[in-house]
């Protein structure tokens, strides 16, 4: 027990997504049986409210036939035949209720944590067939807590039933002289009142039990710092994890780049396929710096961000291609493009009048060869 407490106290780190995934694969999921019971009870009450009349009439008819058959001579063969017939008819009357209840009970269990079939086979452990070990597993704190919860649940449901039945007991005694249909109708009405109050109690108990079950399940999956380090080392060698990590890093870098477009002075475009955002602060920069660049979808995002923040957009296909090919984000432009970029900045700052003139003389391949 002391070793178990020490092990639990050393588990201070929240479970990683990988540990949670492995727990699901092993069939270790948080489920409360109270939730399925509450869902089934709610479905039963809905069905009873909508269509119990037909079933009650059928049961009353079966009861009358059974009582009428009891008036004649009784033989073992006739008794068995009558019992089989009554059981079959009662089962047919109850089938429309029992099947939906079974389905909804399963749905209630799946709804708690999703559908997670066990992917790993159940290993054979010799101590599972050892009676001594089985007795130890039976007498545990968890089992005692579960037994206490069950007894408390039974006591609460009994109290709910008593609150309904005790005030109605004189009327129940009077119904002993009534017809079978009257007895069934009165019993059904009283049962529905009991079950409705039991549903309210059951829903509250199910919510509390599921919250407690999920908390204990999550807490039992806590990890030690050493387990966190070991898992990180294993993940570093996993190609899938590495590719996902690189993808997340690229997405984060792309988002930062797009967000930086608001600080640009101009965006030079192809105009459709390429976009390059430039910023120039004469007091602190020796040359304009590329804030963002991209092709295709990224180019469209850069232009959208520029329009959103009022950054001028200039269409100059040769210069846009040269900037895209020769420049890197966060670095100054090469000296060979100073003049062309200076003319673009002069145009957007209003220092140059007249229509904008593109720069067909800019050749990315030639400029790259001279770098």
Image: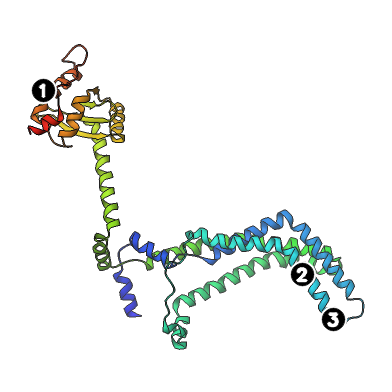
Hey, which quadrant is residue 223 in on the image?
bottom left
In three-dimensional space, the C-alpha distance between marks 3 and 1, rounded to whole angstroms, equals 112 Å
- Secondary structure state at the residue bearing disc 1: helix
Dot 3 or dot 1: first in sequence order is 3
Q: Which mark is first along the chain, 3 or 2?
A: 3
CA–CA distance between discs 2 and 1? 97 Å
Task: Provide the residue designation for mark 1.
Answer: 339
Name the quadrant containing residue 298.
Answer: top left
Which comes sooner in the sequence, label 2 or label 1?
A: 2
Residue located farthest toward the right when viewing the structure as drawn: 72
Residue for point 71% across, 58% down: 48
Residue 319: image location, x then y, percent: 18, 26
Spot occupied by residue 323 in the image (x, y as percentages of width and height): 17, 30
As drawn, which residue projects farthest toward the top? Answer: 354
Q: For the N terminus, which image quadrant? A: bottom left
Label disc, if present, on residue 77 of the rendered structure: 3
Left or right: 133 with respect to 46?
Answer: left
Q: CA distance from mark 2 to mark 3?
A: 17 Å
Q: Are marks 2 and 1 in contact (CB under 8 Å)?
A: no
Instruction: Identify the residue shown where x is 66% and y is 62%.
Output: 99
Q: Position of residue 286 (x, y in %)?
A: 8, 30
Question: Foreground: 208 or 318?
Answer: 318
């Amino acid at each position: 027990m002391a070793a178990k407490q020490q092990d639990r106290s050393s588990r201070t780190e929240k479970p990683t997504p990988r540990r949670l995934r492995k727990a699901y694969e092993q069939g270790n999921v948080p489920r409360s049986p109270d939730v399925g019971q509450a869902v089934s009870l709610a479905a039963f009450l809905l069905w009873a409210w909508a269509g119990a009349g037909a079933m009650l009439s059928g049961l009353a008819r079966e009861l009358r036939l059974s009582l009428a058959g009891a008036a004649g001579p009784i033989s073992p063969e006739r008794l068995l035949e009558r019992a089989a017939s009554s059981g079959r008819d009662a089962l047919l009357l109850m089938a429309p209720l029992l099947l939906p209840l079974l389905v909804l009970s399963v749905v209630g269990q799946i709804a708690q944590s999703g559908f997670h079939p066990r992917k790993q086979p159940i290993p054979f452990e010799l101590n599972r067939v050892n009676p001594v070990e089985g007795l130890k597993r039976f007498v545990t704190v968890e089992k005692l807590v579960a037994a206490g919860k069950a007894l408390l649940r039974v006591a609460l449901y009994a109290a709910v039933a008593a609150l309904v039945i005790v005030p109605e007991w004189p009327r129940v005694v009077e119904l002993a002289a009534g017809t079978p249909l009257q007895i069934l109708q009165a019993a059904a009405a009283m049962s529905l009142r009991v079950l409705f109050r039991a549903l309210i109690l059951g829903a509250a108990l199910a919510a509390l039990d599921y919250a407690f079950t999920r908390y204990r399940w999550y807490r039992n999956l806590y990890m030690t710092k050493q387990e966190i380090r070991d898992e990180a080392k294993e993940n570093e060698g996993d190609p899938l994890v590495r590719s996902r990590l690189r993808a997340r890093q690229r997405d984060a870098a792309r988002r930062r780049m797009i967000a930086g477009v608001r600080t640009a002075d101009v965006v030079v475009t192809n105009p459709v396929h390429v976009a390059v955002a430039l910023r120039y602060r004469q007091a602190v920069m020796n040359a304009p710096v590329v804030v963002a660049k991209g092709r295709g979808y990224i180019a469209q995002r850069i232009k959208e961000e520029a329009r959103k923040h009022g950054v001028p957009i200039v269409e100059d296909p040769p210069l846009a291609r040269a900037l895209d090919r020769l420049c890197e984000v966060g670095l100054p432009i090469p000296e060979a493009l100073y003049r062309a970029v200076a003319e673009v900045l002069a145009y957007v700052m209003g220092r140059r009048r007249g229509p904008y003139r593109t720069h067909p003389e800019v050749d990315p391949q030639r400029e790259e060869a001279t770098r």
